[in-house]
Each structure stands twice: as structure tokens, then as C-alpha cells.
Amino acid sequence: MRLILITGDMIEDPIKWVATAGDKPAGGGIVASLEALTGAIEQEPDEIVVILPGERFAIRRLTTPARNQRQLIQAARFLLEDELAGPVEGLHIALGADAADSTTGRPIIAVEQAWLTGWVAALRDAGFPPDMLTADILALGVRGQAIMLVEKHRLSLTMDGEGFVSDRPLADNLAGDILTVAGVEKLGIIRLADAAPVTVPEAIAVQEVGLPDARHLPSFLAGHIVDNVPVNLLQGTFERGLDWRAAAQPWRYAAGLAVACLALWLVAVGVEGMQFHANAADLERQAQADFAAAYPDLPQRNIASQARQMAADGGAAETWFLELSSVLASAMEERNGVQLAAVTYDASEGLVADIRFLDTDELDQLKQSLSAYGIVVEEGRNLSRDSDNAYIGKLYLRTS
């Protein structure tokens, strides 16, 4: 059995649902909240599809030569940051399928991560972990077509991977303008019986389907997504995996007993360790006394204390070999297009890295990564080429 849930904006809002067996509805209705859904579902579903309201989502198309998942997400963040004119760190970004025509780009979907996290947690806590999590604006989509859902107070428009959801009557005017600018020639409309018709440009050929009321919308979408699978938002950190809380439940008692035993063992080891530490201190004092007796004129110095004192006084503050080497290693883990051939250190020049690279863009990105760590980077002037036509050069690193 497949269970389809259509939610509101808040977790406490009413939920429309439909259960299907094969391609036929087996039950459905509207419940007051997610908590009330448990009593309405008589059979354990094989698959759970959750459809969220589209008002929360930004949908764009991304045209980029990048194919790597990480590169695509990064390009999507740049695009959204530019279009939304704000930070995107708090957004969850999902990728749609590749378009058959590469010139039209790839759908990218962005939504507030905290809101999505709340819904996923609430669904799992209620016993309905989603196999597919999507939005109504995405569930309406048909590749290569424009589809409009008209409700009494709300309008949704999707155009082959792009679209919007908004309140009426403002959405009516927006939809007309968007359809005209996009050059849409054919439009499919799904309209609920209590919703007023939408005026669309006369040049557009319209095919309309009517639904008696909102209770029939889940059944319509259940049939629609069989042939038009929407983007699943369970990507990246939301990708579905094992529910560890449920899996670990039978083992909690054993785990608690193990923790108690571990605590007792640590106490015993701690007492023994204190004894070893006291013995080591006695041996160190005896060794110092023996050294002083054997070499009375030779001063004793603690090298570790001297090094810490030099650092506190600002000694060698300009360049630290280990610090710079560690930062260089961390930055190069993020960039696989630059190879490190050798590293040397000079008090006047700082850390000198001999590098090999094929693409100057990769080198620029490495320099940006190092700068983000607070490292001053200078590039050597003389570049050469090896037998593989790769660049050979140097980077000079100093702490700022």
C-alpha cells in the first residue's frame, strides 16, 4: 500500500491523505493533525509519500557544465544567493533530474532547512517516515508542459521545472504575466469546483480538468505522480537511512549496563594512573638530582617551557612551519586539481610549496581556501611546464 500525505505549513495543520493499492484508492480523507493520522490508517503502508506546501520553495533552473554533485550544489548556492539577494547557509538545496535538452538547465529546489528538519522529525516521531518528500508544486509537474492548480484562495503554476505558489487574487495577475513572458502555448488547468476561473492570455490553448473539492486532490495527485515522478527532497543530509532511535531501543538496557561498567573501570584506571604519575615524578626528581651531582657546572633547561615562552613573547610569530603545513594540507584536501611536489621552510620566505597543476582556476581556488584560513599567499613569478604540459610553480605562505 502507498500512503500519500498532503500537509499544511505547520505540523499542527490538518492533513489530507489517500491510501492506494496498485493504481486504485483504498481509503482517504482529512484528519485534524499528524497525531490523528495514526488512528485513520488501518494498514501498514509499504511506501509513504509526503507532499509539502509549495509556498516555502524557490525553484530555478541551473545551466552549468558541472556534473559532480558537490560542484552542482555549489553552483546552485551561488545562483540562489544572487537571485534571492541573501545568505543561503540556512537552505536545503535539492537537484532535479537532468533535462533531455541540456540548454534548458537542471531544476534546483531550495527550502528553509530548519523547517524541513522539523517536518522530517515530526513525521518519523509519528511513525510515518517518508520514502519520498516533495512539494505540491513539484508533484504537479509534467516534463515539457505547463500545469496550473486553481484553488479557492491559492494558485500553483509549474512550467517544466520552474514555477510558483501564491495567494489569490494576486497570483492570477502574476500567472498571466509569467505565462506570456515564458511563451507558453499550451496550459493544463486543474480547478476545484469552489474556485473562480483564472483568466489566461487568449493565445494559450487551455485544457481544464475539474475536481469536486479539496478532498479529491490527494487521489488526483496519487495517480498523477505514478507517471510523473517528482523531485525527492530527501537528498544530502536528509537522505533516508536507518532510524537509529528505533533500532537501538532493544539495546538500551545493555548499553546502560556497559556504560556503568566502563565508569567503574575508568575509576580504577584513574587511580592506577595517578600512582604511575606520582612514581614518574619521583623518578624525574631523582634523575635531575643525579644529573646535578654528575655535572654541577652544566645548567638544566626545560626545552618545552622555553618553546612555550618564545611563543608567548611573540618569537617566530611571522611563520610557523607546523601551523602553515597543517593549513596547507587542509586546504589541499578541498582541491584535487593541485599536486604538492615538495615543501621547504625558510625563516625569511616562510613556507615554500612546490606545486604542479593543469588548471589555473584550481590554483586560484586553492589560494582562496588558504586566504580563508588567514594565510598570506604569494605566487612565484617563474612558471614552467613539464612533459605532461602541466604547470610547475611555487607558493609562498606566511601567517597574517
Image (cartoon, rainbow, N blue to C red):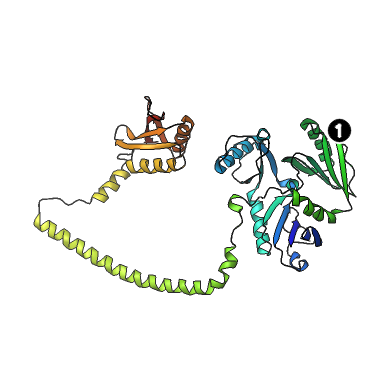
**Residue denoted by label 1:** 201
Comparing 288 with 17, the one in front is 17
Residue at image coords 44%, 40%: 373
- In percent of width and height, residue 166 lies at 78, 43
Quarter of the figure with residue 344 = top left
Quarter of the figure with residue 103 = top right
Quadrant placement of the N terminus? bottom right
Quadrant placement of the C terminus? top left
Q: Is 309 located above or below residue 289 in the figure?
A: above
Does the image show residue 158? Answer: yes
Q: Residues within 10 Å of mark 1 (few under 14, many from 20)?
A: some
Does the image show residue 318? Answer: no
Element carrying mark 1? loop
Residue at image coords 28%, 65%: 277
- In percent of width and height, residue 25 lies at 81, 60
Side of 250 where 1 appears, left or right: right
- In percent of width and height, residue 61 lies at 67, 37
- In percent of width and height, residue 226 lies at 75, 52
Q: Amino acid at mark 1?
A: Pro
Q: Is 15 located above or below residue 356 in the figure?
A: below
Side of 253 where 301 appears, left or right: left
Quarter of the figure with residue 341 = top left
